[in-house]
Image (cartoon, rainbow, N blue to C red):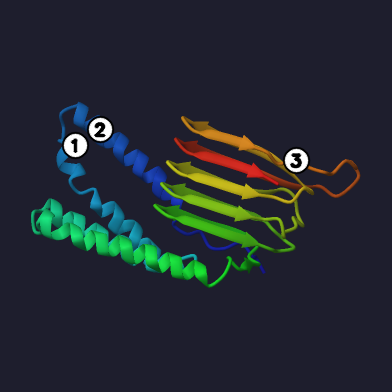
Amino acid sequence: MNDVPARRINGRLIAGALLIFFGVLFTLDNMGVIDAGDVLSWWPVILIAVGALKVIQPPHEGHRKLGYVLLGLGVFFQLQIFGLTHMRSGWPFVLVVIGGLLIWRALDRSAGPPKAESSSQLSEFAIMGGVHRIVETPDFRGGEATAIMGAVELDLRGSTIATSPAVIDVFAMWGGIEITVPPEWRVDVKAMPILGGLENKARSTVRDSSAPTQELVIRGTAIMGGIEIKN
């Protein structure tokens, strides 16, 4: 059977769509066709859309809970813009939501360190938050990781690449992605930083050219964000 997962809406798709949207928006504004300010007054819809995505397609159960929080904040800010809520009476609600989220994350971490997963392919998406995954599989095949105003940490030291190369597509915008690999792997970085940083600290201990090669390819983009690969 084919083990490749079905294509799903992911972080890079959302980020690409947003960049195209804002590019077209400001172009039309410069041409005098529309007023960008009127359109941008609907910016909370982005939070609502991302929250709905996390509720409908959560890679992990914790993403669904964050989705509900983003949905609530998006609806609140949109009502605020429409003048249906008062700033003085509404901000305490935001403080309660953020405080509850922080308490939930603290209690969730107290349960213990992240558990190792055996998935052969990754699909990680962090927006205004953090994701930490430990992957231990004998047949790692790559995947994708997206960080938008958040952080993604991937620990692959317990994994093996059965068929080289394994490819991870990364996208970081105002966020960071950190990937830890075992010393037996060779890492080929093809990512491009744009007003961001890219650092490959991984060093391979393989010196025998006849030994089976475990190669990991990192490709993607960092826009005002950072990508780090290390052992």
Contact flag, marks 1 and 2 (Cβ < 8 Å): yes
Sequence-earlier tag: 1 or 2: 2
Q: What element carries label 2?
A: helix
In this image, 7 relative to 18: left or right? right
Q: Quadrant of the N terminus?
A: bottom right
Mark 2, residue position: 26
Marks 1 and 3, Cα distance to the nearest angstrom? 48 Å
* Three-letter amino acid code at the position of disc 1: Ala
Mark 1, residue position: 36
Marks 1 and 2, Cα distance to the nearest angstrom? 6 Å
Foreground mark, 3 or 2, reads 3
Sequence-earlier tag: 3 or 2: 2
* Three-letter amino acid code at the position of disc 3: Arg
Q: Quick one: 118 or 151, which is closer to the camera? A: 151
Residue 106: name its quadrant. Answer: bottom left
- Callout 2: few (<14), some (14-19), or many (20+) C-alpha neighbours within 10 Å? some
Mark 3, residue position: 203
Q: Position of residue 15 (x, y in %)?
A: 40, 45
Sequence-earlier tag: 1 or 3: 1
- Residue 98 lies, with reference to residue 177, above or below; the image says below
Q: Quick one: 7 or 58, which is closer to the camera? A: 58
- Residue 61 lies, with reference to residue 8, above or below; the image says below
